[in-house]
Image (cartoon, rainbow, N blue to C red):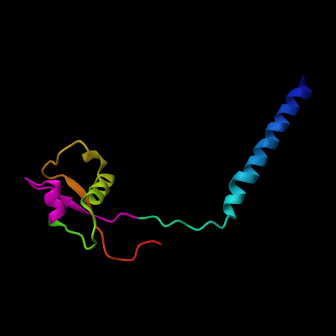
Amino acid sequence: MKIFVATILLLISFYIIKVDLIEGTIPLAYSSQPVECEKNLDYITVEVMAGDTLQSLFSLYPTDKVITYTERLTDFYNLNPHFINQTFKVGEKVFLPTYSASIECK
């Protein structure tokens, strides 16, 4: 019985070592995959005043780059997920996405 348990533990150990060497940390450290460029979303912080809507905030802070309303709305909700089913309250701070005409990641 001891030999059987020792054999099972030895096989499990070999399997763990094989997986680590083939798919684990060592191949990842020496892989030559290109580094993906992460798109960081720039934003400004705006305090909501009485009567402000999302459209009025977008019109007060226009973009330098041509972008559709739906893309800007999606980025807004990525920055402010708590506003998905809520309205603005006076004095709240919201993050508005900003876009510049600079060179993006390739």
Q: What quarter of the picture does the N terminus occupy? A: top right
Instruction: Assess whether residue 57 is covered by the magenta stretch.
Output: yes
Residue 23 location, x and y as percent?
A: 70, 52
Between residue 36 and residue 9, name the one nearer to us.
36
Looking at the image, the residue that sits furthest to the bottom is 102
Query: Residue 20, how many percent across, how many down?
Result: 73, 50
Residue appearing at x 13%, y 59% in the figure: 56
In this rendered view, identify the residue nearer to me: 55 or 68. Answer: 68
Q: Give the range drawn in magenta.
A: 40-59
Q: Where is residue 11 in the image (x, y as percent from the top left)?
A: 83, 37
Q: Residue at x 14, y 53 (%)?
A: 91
Residue 81 drawn in magenta: no
Q: Is residue 25 above or below residue 9?
A: below
Which residue appears farthest toward the right when viewing the image?
Answer: 3
The residue under the point 23% across, 55% down is 94
Q: Position of residue 84 (x, y in %)?
A: 26, 45
- Left or right? Give the position of 22 relative to 10: left
Q: In the rendered picture of this protein, how many numbered marks are placed on residues?
A: 0
The correct choice, above or below, for 47 with respect to 34 in the image is above
Instruction: Say which quarter of the image contains residue 105.
Output: bottom left
Q: Which residue lies furthest to the top in this view?
A: 1
Q: In which quarter of the image is residue 40?
A: bottom left
